Image (spheres, rainbow, N blue to C red):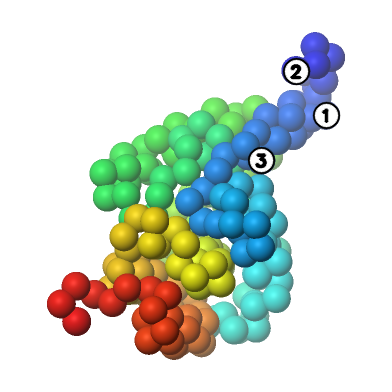
Amino acid sequence: MSQIAPGTDRLGRQIAFMIEVDKLKEVFRQTKLINSRRQENDAEHSWHLCLAVILLAEHANQPGLDVLRVLKMVILHDLVEIDAGDTFAYDAVGMTDQHEREARAADRIFGLLPDDQAAEFRQCWDEFEAQTTPEAQFALSCDRFQPMLLNLMTEGASWKEHGITHDRVVARNQCLQQGSVPMWERMSAMLEEAVRIGIVAPAPGS
């Protein structure tokens, strides 16, 4: 890494934050990319997620959604994985302390910023975690929709790799309807079709 210091004034702290969060490009997820089948990294996920918010906002349950607020949430919420790592969606053990690990990471990473921006970014992150506003709920809807879409378009690659069946996908992701009923209904239909053609394994015993 370069030894050039960005400075300790306001702009310097903002630059230091930019340098730090570049590490997000090196955090890899279980989801595979559609064309290359390599693992998606968190920065790629964040870009695709922001695009989904802009593209799909008209399908949110709440009319007049503050789309800029949603975008802030989705671009910020995975930055904590620089420290905490990506917790696989179906890893029950990893999820037991996920919030604590990510909250510590939020303290450190957002703490690099000037105090006012640190507070604003942390508030956005906390709002996403709390899931009490329409904006947070739609942000989560897009965050669940995007990896499901990639899984379906890669013939269930990461689900098959980890033995994830249809019932587990539904149980994990049906909260999507809290932000967008139409998006959940469409994804549910796509999942049913995926089971029919053998891309997603049915629930055991079904």
Viewer-side label of 1, 3:
3
Residue 45 image offset from top left, x and y in percent: 62, 55
Secondary structure at badge 3 equals: helix
Quarter of the rendering occupied by the C terminus? bottom left
Question: In this rendering, does residue 8 appear at all?
Answer: yes
Element marked by disc 2:
loop
Q: Residue at x 15, y 77 (%)?
A: 205
- Asked whether residue 21 is in view, the answer is no
Relative depth, front residue between 101 and 43: 43
Q: Quadrant of residue 177?
A: bottom left
Which amino acid type is shown beneath numbered disc 3? Lys
Q: Which residue is mark 2?
A: 1
Q: Which mark is residue 25?
A: 3
Q: Which residue type carries mark 2?
A: Met
- In this rendering, which labeled residue sits more in front, label 1 or label 2? 2
Q: Is residue 73 above or below residue 134?
A: above
Q: Is residue 95 left or right of residue 43?
A: left
Q: Where residue 171 appears, x then y in whole percent?
A: 30, 70
Mark 1 = which residue? Answer: 11
Tell me, for residue 38, which label it has, or none.
none
Secondary element at tag 1: helix
